Image (tube, helix red, strand yellow):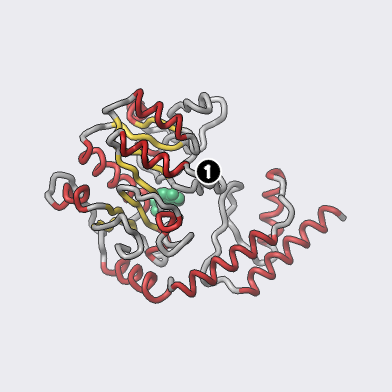
Amino acid sequence: LVRRFAPIEQLRFCNSGTEATMDALRLARAHVGRDKIVKIEGSYHGHHDAVLMSTKPPIDAAGPVSRPNSVPASKGIPSDVKNNTIIAPYNDAEALERILTEHEGEVAAVITEAVLMNVGIMLPEEGYLESVREITRRHGVLLIFDEVKTGVTVAPGGITELYPVEPDLICLAKSIGGGMPIGVFGGREEVMRHINHQEVVHLGTFNGNPMSMRAGLVTLTQIFTPEAHAHAIGLSKQLGEGYVWDIDMHLSYAYWLFLANRGILFPPGFDDQWTVSIQHTQADIDHHLHVFHQFVSELTR
Ligand SMILES: Cc1ncc(COP(=O)(O)O)c(C=O)c1O
């Protein structure tokens, strides 16, 4: 992981993406010495209180586009948590600049998925991530990339490899464990050392357990090879390009059933993304696109 992700000099293992973002945020607060964080509207970082805000807020509660409200995504979150989680709109560097200026000296970190992958897939506009990096640095705020979904899938070194932007901390989980529970957060020694010096606690019975470590090592060194990665990206491209028509949101449940009845199971969430696995084959993609065409002909018959 250190070889794949340039900003990671040191890392710690935990058990999930939720733990990775929770621990990274605590570390950032300790390093910077401030309490508040900025989270991007629509971004999902797991189910701990600080980030379970404005993940998919109801439209009547979301607030103004460029000044979104902090909307808890669950009951049971103490009411004062939202005071420390400020919500910024995605792809709006100006709004981030304003928020950090209004809260000068109060914000420890900006956490974001560099590509939003929990509200469909939203790509950063040209220059956005670079501006976020420049703005956070200027305000003395750490930048945390949540690469729980993108890490080692969109490229061997995640989004951090694809964009010329170095975050201060990176969070990883999911695919890096090859199916076993795992999480990782890492960054520069200067930040990570608060844990090494026991100023910040990082605890967990199963952190770094041998089963997950072995599965992760084998996944990264023997299974998720550059060839396997190129294969999956190639199939993914074909699948994307094969969808020559859009399917209306209102038909997505019918489409889900249509696919399920023909041996294709994809996540039932209407705005969930599909990820091609390195185990998928050309035959899988051909079958999928064949069923897609069948569905369209049924509708237009
Ligand atoms: C971007 C992102 N971060 C964090 C998480 C939380 O990970 P976990 O479910 O392993 O706690 C998820 C889970 O979907 C995620 O998509």
For the N terminus, the image quarter is bottom left
Residue at horizontal 44%, vertical 44%?
129
Q: Is residue 49 in sight in this rendering?
A: no
The number of numbered discs placed on residues in the rendered structure image is 1
**Left or right for 202, reference 53:** left
Q: In this view, does 241 lie above or below 17?
A: below
Check the image and name the residue furthest to the right. Answer: 301
Residue that label 1 marks:
125
Q: Is residue 56 in sight in this rendering?
A: yes
For the C terminus, the image quarter is bottom right
Identify the amino acid type marked 1: Glu
Residue at horizontal 30%, vertical 62%?
2
Check the image and name the residue furthest to the left. Answer: 197
Q: Is residue 144 above or below residue 75?
A: below
Q: Is residue 252 above or below residue 88?
A: below
Residue at horizontal 35%, vertical 23%?
102
Q: Toward the viewer: 54 or 193? A: 193
**Left or right for 113, reference 258:** left
Report which quarter residue 177 is drawn in.
bottom left
Q: Is residue 246 above or below residue 237?
A: above
The percent coordinates of residue 42 (x first, y second) are: 49, 39
**Left or right for 268, reference 165:** right
Report which quarter residue 233 is drawn in.
bottom right
Q: Residues within 10 Å of mark 1 (few under 14, many from 20)?
A: few
The percent coordinates of residue 183 (x first, y second) are: 33, 56
